[in-house]
Amino acid sequence: MLQRLLGHLRAFKPAYMAYNFLHRRRLRHNEALYRRYGLRQPIYSSISSADFREAAPGESPRFDRADSARLAPTLPGFAEFDEATQQQILQWSEKGYLVLRGLFTAAEVATINAEVAQLIDKGEADWNARQVKIMFAIRQSEAIRRIVAKRELERVLDFLLGKKAHVFQSINFLRGSEQLAHSDSIHMTTYPLGYLVAAWIALEPVTAENGPVFYYPGSHRLPYVLNGDFPHGGSHFLIGDQAYQHYEQAIEAVIARENTPAEELHAQPGDVLIWHANLLHGGRPIRRAGSTRRSMVLHYFAQDDVVCYHEITQRPALL
Ligand SMILES: O=C(O)CCC(=O)C(=O)O
């Protein structure tokens, strides 16, 4: 009953606007950006890609404009990465993902797992509505926050975006997500497009059995699928209640049309997968019933010059 009421409230745009108004300090950075890009609505209003149709142009990320295989070696900072990382960065523009094996130590992984277990035991874990994801553990655990702010990781993220990456969100999973294919840009979107990046960390061995992450290499170069590209539904006041299902169907159609094979990541604890804002990815079904697949995903927005918002729910992102 309460969940249904919250669901209705979440679909009601004026409720969000009132919430945003109360939290407008966390949106203040958008004032200068709205002026710069020519957006006329107040910073606490709803926002979606439709509002940017007439916006002043912005520059897309450097490795969307030019191939990282050619451009990256000419840029400051590249020579300081180890050779394995350099090789991964070179393939970024073509594939839209990269893998950093063993970036986190066994001790760091054990600490993250222990901290998450403690949040659950104490009843403090911020579970999402379907009780699958634990949201924002980085806000609650100083130890997790410190571990994931690893310089080697941040240097790669900053280099890929060509701007300072700012961690926006963390999600912890105890089991495979079994999520259908999607691009993060339907949830966390930027203007100009492409200034989001995700880092997924394996917190236990991941095989074909426990629901690995899968992705479509190169799919980040396909056109972004945004609200105007599927029957989003809704109205001036409401978000369409079937919007996300319709989005998933639109993505299934893209995948069927493109007919390119997916890859999946089998990983050891501490391995990191980084994916592009528009890479199509999801979680494979769990084949071994009851198996766990502890993992953590962090989403980063570029810190400067970029409007960050949530396309599907048409909300500005509170930073
Ligand atoms: O961990 C997974 O299975 C997928 C996570 C995911 O798709 C996401 O965070 O966007």
Image (cartoon, helix red, strand yellow):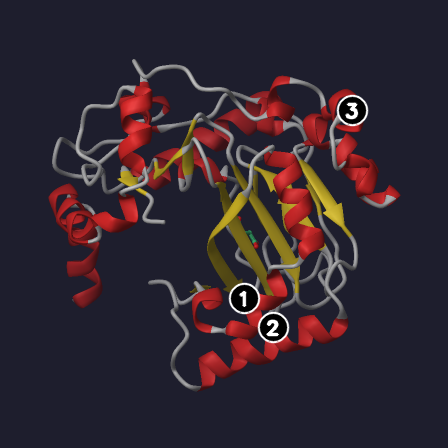
Residue 86 in percent (x, y) is at 81, 38
Classify residue 51 by image quadrant.
Answer: top left
User: In the picture shown, does residue 304 fall above or below 16?
Assistant: above
Distance of label 2 from label 3 (alpha carbons): 36 Å
Relative to 116, does residue 279 appear above or below in the rendering? above
Residue at 50 percent of width and 34 percent of height: 195
- Label 1 or label 3, whichever comes before in sequence order: 3
Front residue (pair 34, 317): 34
> Tag 2's secondary structure?
helix
Q: Is mark 2 within 8 Å of ligand 1?
A: no
Q: Is residue 214 above or below residue 190?
A: below
Q: Which numbered circle lies on residue 145?
A: 1
Residue at the spot x=34%, y=35% of the render?
311
Is the residue marked by circle 2 packed among few (<14), some (14-19), or many (20+) residues within 10 Å?
many
Which x, y percent locates residue 177?
53, 57
Q: Nearer the viewer, residue 92 or 242?
A: 92
Quadrant in the picture for residue 84: top right
Residue located 44% across and 25% down the image: 192
- Residue 237 placed where, x, y %? 12, 37
Q: In the picture shown, does residue 135 fall above or below 181?
A: below
Q: Quadrant of residue 124?
A: bottom left
Task: Determine if residue 48 is in view.
Answer: no
Q: Nearer the viewer, mark 1 or mark 3?
A: 3
Q: Which residue is mark 3?
A: 74
Residue on which the image places disc 2: 112
| Residue type of the residue flagged with mark 2 | Ile
Expressed as whole percent of the image width and height from the top left, the position of residue 121 reads 46, 86
